[in-house]
Image (tube, rainbow, N blue to C red):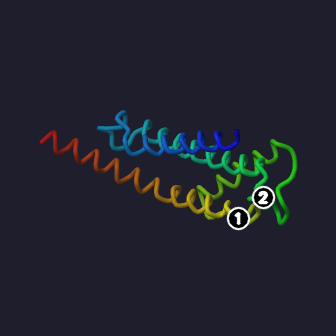
Amino acid sequence: MYNLLIVLVILCICMSLRTLFFSYKLKNKQISFDNFLFLAFAYCVLMIGFGLIFLLLEIKGFNIIMDHGSQLEGSYFHKLYTSVYLSAVTLFSVGFGDVVPLGIGRVIVIMEALIGYTIPAAFVVKSVLDFDQVNIKKK
């Protein structure tokens, strides 16, 4: 059951990234509120998705999160909060060091950080290329 949930979460993350690069709604607009909302929702999907992956692996028995120097313990909601927190600080920064990944969690964190750092660049390049194509068609 957990494996199926992990696959579904990964599928949602991949579909979110796919729409970032192949979105039809955002064409012909260089900068707009729609683009900003789209980027914000893409980040939210990634943050929650990777948080759920951390949570599912933690529930499955893999100890992949160390919280303030000890293994992650507590209620389900505490584990959910800590997993999403780890995902957020990984996606938006280099982390604070209060929640640390262990084992396979380190590999997942590296993938999330790489995705988080490349999204703004990819989004800007895509917007500029779409804008250039619109200008070429107008001439």
| Vertical relation: 44 (above or below) 69 | above
Number of numbered markers: 2
Q: Which residue is drawn at 56% across and 59% down?
A: 111
Foreground pick, 78 / 30: 78
> Residue 15, how many percent across, how many down?
48, 40
Closest to the observer, 10 or 29: 10
Q: In which quarter of the image is the C terminus?
A: top left
Q: Do the residues labelled 2 and 1 touch (CB within 8 Å)?
A: yes
Disc 1 target residue: 103
Outermost residue, top side: 25
Residue at position x 53%, y 56% in the image: 116
Residue 6, x across and y down, in percent: 64, 44
Which class describes the residues within 10 Å of circle 1: few (<14), some (14-19), or many (20+)? Answer: few
Mark 2 falls on what kind of element? loop
111 left or right of 18? right
Q: Relative to residue 21, is residue 103 depicted above or below?
A: below
Looking at the picture, how far across and down is residue 21, in whole percent? 39, 45
Residue 102 horizontal side relative to residue 6, left or right: right
Residue assigned mark 2:
63
Instruction: Say which quarter of the image contains residue 125.
Output: bottom left
For mark 2, does the 10 Å Cα neighbourhood hold few (<14), some (14 to 19), or many (20 or more) residues?
Answer: some
What amino acid type is highlighted by mark number 1? Answer: Gly
Task: State the CA–CA distance, disc 2 to disc 1.
Answer: 8 Å
